[in-house]
Amino acid sequence: MEELNCIVTNIMRVSPIMKIIRIKPVGWDLPEYKAGQFVALGLQGKAAKCADSTEEFSEQEPEKIIKRAYSIASSSTQEYVEFYVTLVHSGSLTPRLFELKIGDNLWMGKKAVGMFTIDEIDPEQNVVLVATGTGVAPYMSMLRSNALSRKGKVIVIHGAANSWDLGYSSELELLQSMFPNFTYYPTITNPEKEPSGWNGDVRFIQDIWDDKVVEKKWGFAPTSENTHVFLCGNPNMTDGMTEVLEKNGFKEHKRKEAGQIHVEKF
Ligand SMILES: Cc1cc2nc3c(=O)[nH]c(=O)nc-3n(C[C@H](O)[C@H](O)[C@H](O)COP(=O)(O)OP(=O)(O)OC[C@H]3O[C@@H](n4cnc5c(N)ncnc54)[C@H](O)[C@@H]3O)c2cc1C
């Protein structure tokens, strides 16, 4: 049987349904990984579930480890790995992850995988990093690694329901104040719920792109010649943005055919 090979070292509650969880391996070394990659996390079926979970679609075997993919949010220079997780009330793994306390054990796959990385993109190129919800996780890994030493411009456009769901906003604001080539652009879809109002954008990311917000921030137009666009999170956003970008001459990056749109669907 596979053992629960990691220990929880830190938990930060971002909102009632979002947590940042840090874990460390127990008795083995973290794998080498590139910013933007993901690993599998898991817990046994018998693990306790959080109180606000709802019924699952299928019964879990008590000893079997339920495994799901999670993007790494920390830089590879840390001795811990950080994840940004949304609770899916009727899901199998997240209600169990949300019940974890500091010091509890869980399973992590020993190999990080994925092609959603920035390393091979010419540092002179500009980069647009678009996320919904926890889709910002791989960008945190990129920004905390070496993305901000690039010569080109970097912008994070982060969409969420409410301002309190914009995890990492303080860190992203700080990075914006420190790095002249970096812009943070949040947008929320439920402004009427904000207790103290919201001065930022409230549009869908597709409309923000169409309104040329990136061009206004950069002072020049992002084109398929000078910019790569990363899309991560909700498939409605990644599909919608891909369609908009393709109309603007960008092409999806594929293993056999290089392009400028890089997609990771959660
Ligand atoms: C590359 C990658 C990276 C990812 N990174 C992250 C990340 O950083 N953070 C993050 O929060 N998530 C991430 N995800 C999503 C994550 O892997 C899980 O899918 C998510 O956490 C839900 O897992 P779960 O086990 O709780 O839900 P699941 O059990 O997988 O259920 C998901 C949904 O499907 C429904 N469902 C389940 N079974 C059925 C059925 N038989 N019929 C109909 N509906 C059903 C459930 O009710 C629920 O709404 C990533 C996914 C991928 C592919």
Image: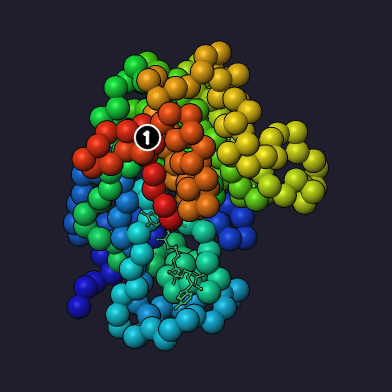
Q: Which residue is mark 1?
A: 251
Vertical side of 29 occupied by 119: above or below: above
What SS does tag 1 mark?
Answer: loop
Q: Quadrant of residue 229?
A: top left
Vertical side of 204 occupied by 59: above or below: below
Few, some or many residues within 10 Å of mark 1 (<14, 14–19, 20+): many
Q: Amino acid at mark 1?
A: Lys
Query: Looking at the rendering, in which quadrant would you find the C terminus?
Result: bottom left
What x and y, as percent, mark residue 57?
A: 47, 81
Give the farthest residue toward the top: 219
Q: Nearer the viewer, residue 70 or 11?
A: 70
What x and y, as percent, mark residue 137?
A: 44, 45
Q: Quadrant of ligand 1?
A: bottom left
Q: Quadrant of residue 207?
A: top right
Query: Looking at the rendering, in which quadrant would you find the N terminus?
Result: bottom left
Q: Which residue is pictured at 37% across the width and 34% down the height? A: 251
